[in-house]
Image (spheres, grey):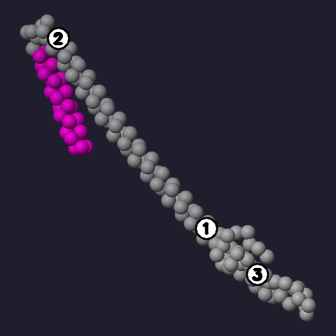
């Protein structure tokens, strides 16, 4: 009898070999030995399958954990980039508004409220720029 699975329990993956002889037929002489060999082979196959199944499940669980970890890292990276992009866009809006107020101030040089507003916008823009620059240096 041949086992189709490539196991290392016996040479050439044989469960056993039996032959008829002139004294007694195979069924009478070797049945207990055949039964014992097949029972042992079946136990070994079941054991291997359960080990294979357990190791496959463990490998699958590990792959799922690694995939979830990679996805989490990608989400964090995306959130980081979105935050930095939004902060830079906010800085650009403040800087553009400060430039607009400077042009308006050129037309109305005596308007104190306009000067205060422009100064506040410039302070906010500068604070954002420093913050972005500091974070960028930390990344290097």
Query: Looking at this view, is 32 or 97 the one in front?
Result: 32
Q: Which residue is mark 2?
A: 103
Which quadrant of the figure contains the C terminus?
Answer: top left
Q: Which residue is mark 1?
A: 52
The residues tagged by marks 1 and 2 sit, at their Cα atoms, a distance apart of 76 Å
Magenta stretch: residue 77 in it?
A: no
Query: Looking at this view, is 23 or 86 the one in front?
Result: 23
Work out whether residue 43 can be spotted. no
Question: Is residue 64 toward the left or the right of residue 96 in the image?
Answer: right
> Where is residue 38 drawn, in percent x and y?
76, 80
The residues tagged by marks 3 and 1 sit, at their Cα atoms, a distance apart of 24 Å
Query: Looking at this view, is 20 or 39 the one in front?
Result: 20
Magenta residues span 113-140
Q: Which residue is mark 3?
A: 16
Secondary structure of the residue carrying numbered label 2: helix
Alpha-carbon neighbours of circle 2 within 10 Å: few (<14), some, or many (≥20)?
few
Q: Earlier in the sequence, mark 3 or mark 1?
A: 3
Alpha-carbon neighbours of circle 1 within 10 Å: few (<14), some, or many (≥20)?
few
Report the residue at 70% width, 69% height from top. 5
Disc 2 versus disc 3: nearer the observer: 3
Secondary structure of the residue carrying numbered label 3: loop
Q: Are marks 1 and 2 in contact (CB under 8 Å)?
A: no
Secondary structure of the residue carrying numbered label 1: helix
Q: Quadrant of residue 30?
A: bottom right
């Amino acid at each position: 009898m041949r086992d189709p699975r490539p196991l290392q329990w016996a040479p050439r993956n044989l469960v056993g070999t039996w032959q008829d002889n002139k004294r007694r037929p195979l069924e009478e002489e070797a049945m207990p030995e055949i039964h014992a060999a097949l029972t042992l082979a079946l136990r070994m196959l079941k054991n291997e399958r359960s080990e294979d199944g357990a190791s496959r499940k463990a490998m699958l669980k590990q792959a799922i954990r690694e995939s979830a970890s990679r996805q989490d890292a990608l989400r964090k990276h995306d959130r980081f980039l979105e935050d930095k992009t939004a902060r830079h866009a906010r800085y650009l809006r403040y800087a553009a508004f400060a430039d607009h107020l400077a042009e308006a101030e050129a037309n109305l040089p005596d308007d104190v409220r306009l000067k205060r507003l422009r100064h506040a916008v410039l302070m906010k823009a500068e604070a954002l720029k420093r913050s972005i620059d500091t974070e960028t240096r930390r990344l290097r």
